[in-house]
Amino acid sequence: MVDNVNAPSRRSYGQFCGLARALDVVGDRWNLLIVRELLPGPLRYGELKASLPGVASNLLAERLRTMEETGVVERALGGAGVLYGLTRWGAELKEPMEALGRWGVPLLAEGRGDDEFRPRWLTLALPAILHGRTATPAVEVGFDVEGLLIVLRIDEDGPSARIGDENRPDTVLVADAETVVGLVAGALTVDQAIDAGELRGDPAPLRQAFA
Amino acid sequence: MVDNVNAPSRRSYGQFCGLARALDVVGDRWNLLIVRELLPGPLRYGELKASLPGVASNLLAERLRTMEETGVVERALGGAGVLYGLTRWGAELKEPMEALGRWGVPLLAEGRGDDEFRPRWLTLALPAILHGRTATPAVEVGFDVEGLLIVLRIDEDGPSARIGDENRPDTVLVADAETVVGLVAGALTVDQAIDAGELRGDPAPLRQAFA
DNA sequence: CCGCATCCTCATGGATACTG
DNA sequence: CAGTATCCATGAGGATGCGG
């Protein structure tokens, strides 16, 4: 190995500007997508790699290292090995990422095509699309996409989503990614979405949320 | 020239996700900084280059071309030549960029150092820092930084900023970038900021905004 | 001049093999 | 399984050229 002093490079914009300095930290390729994977909760290296189709393992390792140095990511020793999670500051990227994802929603209209998809990504996308919506009383519906349960909740504080636990909502719609996004984005009606999928439980919450 | 068919490359993440598709469009290096320059209003190529220290001329040209193709940027024929501006959709990047800039504010705490600075950048940074703040009646103060007047306004809709026109506010603080950012971010008191700069006009609005 | 296009060099990204 | 090491393709940066 050559005396590779400054291996994890550092191509800074060199600008006294909050946006530019933020991009110095998370602007490199793959960085924000790594953060997206970690937002719902810590993952192991192998899970991260599987969730990020196309990322090279050396890049993933290097990005995790530099984001740990900059205070965005932290390692923890989970029972089975190393767990990568977000620091408190790193988790605050949720807001700008949701905003950017919302800006990109029109780009989803052209459909999935041959693109990759992981149900986990819906925990960022669904609240982003529904941003600003509130509901009282709260509504909770589940979406079973490719076998993973995503629980969407809308209450007086706005929308939020999580990966489903034992706590299953009354209503679960089993459907594919395009159907779920189409329904939430308003491109599909509730009836069209139910026709395209399989409804388990009570349709009322679904209609209440997306009438 | 080789038969360079797909010259403006297109390294897509290939993911069905609003964030990933947004990054396909504006995630390449310099793209968001170009948009930042255009947010306060259209600029010419030379002005853009001067406002973005370090950008290579071929990169700037290529980025402008691809962002025009993707519908973020549009050319207009101003009297003196070509003007680059944002489309309506491109201007909607303001919200995610402010959010990301706000996330990066802690990185400004270490000071300017040898970094470049353009007063124009404050029109994004100041509202980002003050996000959520309202004031009734509205307050308007000016900051004269390196000869450019930045007008900050806080009203019931929140903070906004523009490049100063004939419409000068009652209060103008002449100071450097670090002082202005320190004052707005709360790291400096009004008195400290006035001591560090030169106050023109009535100090009352300044105290009302940053008491 | 201004608005780019070309050229050249080197840093960075991507794919894959490899190792503790 | 969790990363490193290696090799090649590509993109960034900087200087310069050139037509309008």
Image: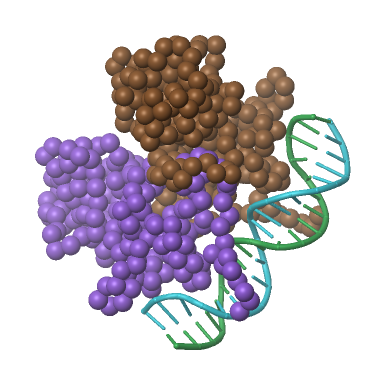
Chain colours: A purple, B brown, C green, D cyan
Q: In this view, does A200 lie above or below B107?
A: below
- Judge by depth and name the residue closer to the eye, B112 or B11: B112
D14 relative to B88 in the view: left or right: right
Q: Position of residue C5 (x, y in %)?
A: 78, 45
| Percent coordinates x, y for residue A185 in the rendering | 33, 42
**Quick one: quadrant of the N terminus of chain B?**
bottom right
Q: Can residue B163 be seen in this view?
A: no
Closest to the observer, A25 or B41: A25
Q: Could you tell me which quadrant the C terminus of chain B lies in? A: top left
Residue ID at (24%, 47%): A160
Rendered location of residue A30, percent (x, y): 48, 59
User: Which residue is painted at 17% across and 38% down in the image?
Assistant: A156
Q: Point out the residue furthest to the front here.
A: B195
Task: In the rendered view, tell whether residue A93 sits above or below residue A135.
Answer: below
Q: Residue at x 45, y 33 (%)?
A: B181
Q: In which quarter of the image is residue A45?
A: bottom left
Q: Residue at left 28%, top 78%?
A: A80
The x, y position of residue A209, in whole percent, is 20, 41
